[in-house]
Amino acid sequence: MTAVWSLVVLAITVAGCGRDDSSDEAAATNAIAPTNVTATNTIAPTSAAATNTAAPPTPTSTPRPTATREPTPVPAGPVEIALQVLYPQAPDDHFERVGTSERSLGASTMAEFLPRLIEGVNEVYLGSGINGQFVLVDHRQIDLNAKDPNWESKLPFLFMNGVNPTSNDQERAIWSAVSALRDEVAADIIVFWRRPGTEPSANGAAAIGAEAEEAFVQMTYFGMPVISTLAHELGHILGAYHEDGYIGTARFDVDGEPRDDRYRTVMTITSEMTSEGAPLPYIRRFSSPTGRVDGEVGCDVYLSLMSGGIRQVPLTCLFDDAPLGDAEHNAVGAINANVVRVSQFR
């Protein structure tokens, strides 16, 4: 099966930190330095300083295939899916700009940050009733300049297309090197976290209902730290579509401020706006026919700035028994049907 690829489109710029793409370039080391970690069960509070400015997401739509595979039976306990994260700079150099933002999760190093990020994603899955959890088996800097000086721009393309008869020797060498890293730690899914200043129009990209050799996610620098965005892209790997997302209307509080407005679940891509003219907030839950949110839940909210821009910030939303889906919007069902299959990729 050839998976369909999906892009989450969200142009992000940075305010207040003197962004200069030329200063983001790190010196090549020609080394691959492993930095293995084990995920913890702690999610630290986010810092108060706001740095990210985001434009509204552009809706994209991918038609569903006419034929689908039979779902794999889901066991009683959570299924572990091994995750490997690769990035092109030294760990703390790559983390530096996230570390000074409100997306730092209270971490001061890459070794602290990534386990907290993955734990935040796992909370989205567990809280939605999904029987799968991600285990961060490895994260490391990679430098493939010896294979191809342009490897950073080619790797996302290879993630989306793989190698084929038209691939050249350099592309095959890049693919082989990354595949070897994946096999070394038996990772079911690889995430490539791009360098600052190399962001395409899409905030992330992943194959929908991926097979083993398609289980790759690429994330932009400022898209990776957004819990709902990473959860979204991993949801694509596990078979969820944008159309599975749900938009609801309710009275809810955002950091203590009440509003009567619309909200959306993790897989939803829409051009609809709130009554204040901002993109709809993401509730950190996947849709399901019986799912409801009652009480506090993490959310990623777009706030309008006095300057006229929009920034996305991690906040807490408070709901009084609001729906998370219906019979036509069931991302949880799609994902649960694939967790065992994906966990067996390596």
Image (cartoon, rainbow, N blue to C red):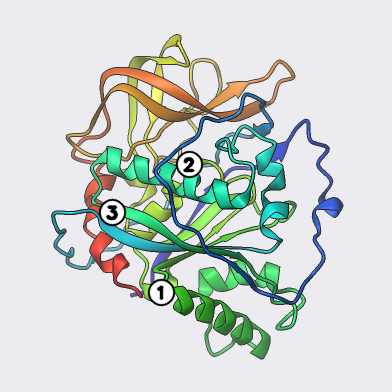
Total labels: the figure holds 3
Q: Is residue 297 left or right of residue 77?
A: right
Asked if one can make out residue 224 in the rendered structure from this viewpoint, the answer is no
Disc 2 vs disc 3: Cβ atoms closer than 8 Å? no
Asked if one can make out residue 298 in the rendered structure from this viewpoint, the answer is yes
Q: Quadrant of the N terminus?
A: bottom left
Residue 19 image-quadrant placement: top right
Q: Quadrant of the C terminus?
A: bottom left
* Label whose residue precedes the other's in the sequence (2 or 3): 3
Measured Cα–Cα span from mark 2 to mark 3: 16 Å
Image coordinates of residue 179 in percent, x first then y, are 51, 79
Disc 1 target residue: 186
Disc 3 target residue: 132
- Which residue corresponds to the image point at 27% horizontal and 39% vertical from the top-left? 128
> Circle 1 sits in a helix, a strand or a loop, which is it?
loop
Badge 2 density bin: few <14, some 14–19, many ≥20, Cα 10 Å: many
In terms of depth relative to the viewer, which is nearer, 211 or 57? 211
- Which residue corresponds to the image point at 54% horizontal and 53% vertical from the top-left? 204
Q: Which callout, 3 or 1, points to the residue nearer the camera? A: 1
Measured Cα–Cα span from mark 3 to mark 1: 17 Å
Residue 266 image-quadrant placement: top left
Badge 1 density bin: few <14, some 14–19, many ≥20, Cα 10 Å: some
Q: Is residue 30 above or below residue 247?
A: below
In terms of depth relative to the viewer, which is nearer, 43 or 174? 43
Q: Amino acid at mark 2?
A: Ile
Disc 1 vs disc 2: Cβ atoms closer than 8 Å? no
- Which residue corresponds to the image point at 36% horizontal and 51% vertical from the top-left? 241
Image coordinates of residue 325 in percent, x first then y, are 25, 34
> Circle 2 sits in a helix, a strand or a loop, which is it?
helix
